[in-house]
Amino acid sequence: CIEKPLTTSSSLTDDVITVENLADCMNFLFTSVTNKSLFKDLDSSIESFQQTRSLHSERVPLRELVESLYLDCLEKTLSEPSVQEHTQSNPHYLRNIKISIESYVLYGLRNLLPIAVSASTASDDAELNKTIRNLHYLQLEDLEINVDVQVGISRGKMELSRLDSFATVLGKTGCLKRAIKYLSEGLETISTDDLLPILIFVVIRTGLPNWIAQLTFMKQFRFSSDNANPNDE
């Protein structure tokens, strides 16, 4: 079936559109912005940032550098009349714009930013990896995990192994949410106390070498967060 009328203004669906991945963000921006030259301007800002900033040697904190680029791109987008028309009266639309610009910027920095973050957390990741290697012998029964969740653990572990392939905070948090959903499948109810040992087991078995870098990335570069959505934190 068709999600929305083929011939209508976007205002009819502004209040129900939710961006859940990078493709959603790109589509949302493209349909929201009438002046398509804005994207050349955004790309130019991102390219200039990469050419003039050395993220490994800058004295300014990495988050502040990237946030300045995000705010610049957001300001340019919000100045577009076609965007202003909706953001002034629709908080949900504004939130989608913020998430989409955040994702646009982070994807534009995909060949630079993750490497810089990993370099900054290399020592902590090395320590964690040493601990994980020492715990690799752990079995489900060692953590008192019910064997009924074994299928969910396999799916959750497979999903988490993809975490490093996502270039945006939206993509990474989506990956985490899907993994948790898989881990809890087949269980009628699951509490935080039940989920914690399962997550510990999966983290140990996933084999991801840079967990600290992944968590740092999600925490440091979620510029679009606001008090209206505390559950995403």
Image: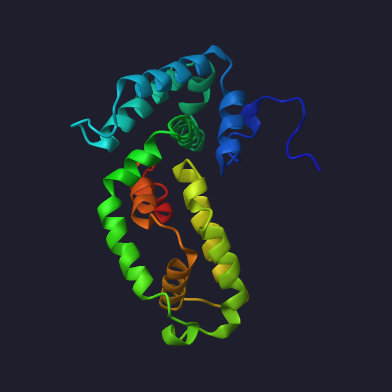
Work out whether 228 lies above or below 59: below
| Corner quadrant of residue 127 | bottom left
Q: Quadrant of the N terminus?
A: top right
Q: Position of residue 167 (x, y in %)?
A: 48, 41
Is residue 212 at least partly visible in the picture?
Answer: yes
Left or right of 116 in this view: 148: right
Q: Is residue 161 left or right of residue 228?
A: right
Residue at point 34%, 55% (across, down) = 212
User: Which residue sits at x=43%, y=79%?
Assistant: 137
In this rendered view, identify the residue nearer to me: 115 or 79.
115
- Write down the quadrant of residue 156 in the picture: bottom right
Q: Nearer the viewer, residue 74 or 9?
A: 74
Q: Nearer the viewer, residue 16 or 174?
A: 174
Q: Position of residue 31 (x, y in %)?
A: 62, 25
| Residue at left offset 61%, top offset 28% | 11
Q: Position of residue 155 (x, y in %)?
A: 60, 66
Residue 181 appears in view? no
Q: Please, is residue 26 above or below residue 232 in the view?
A: above
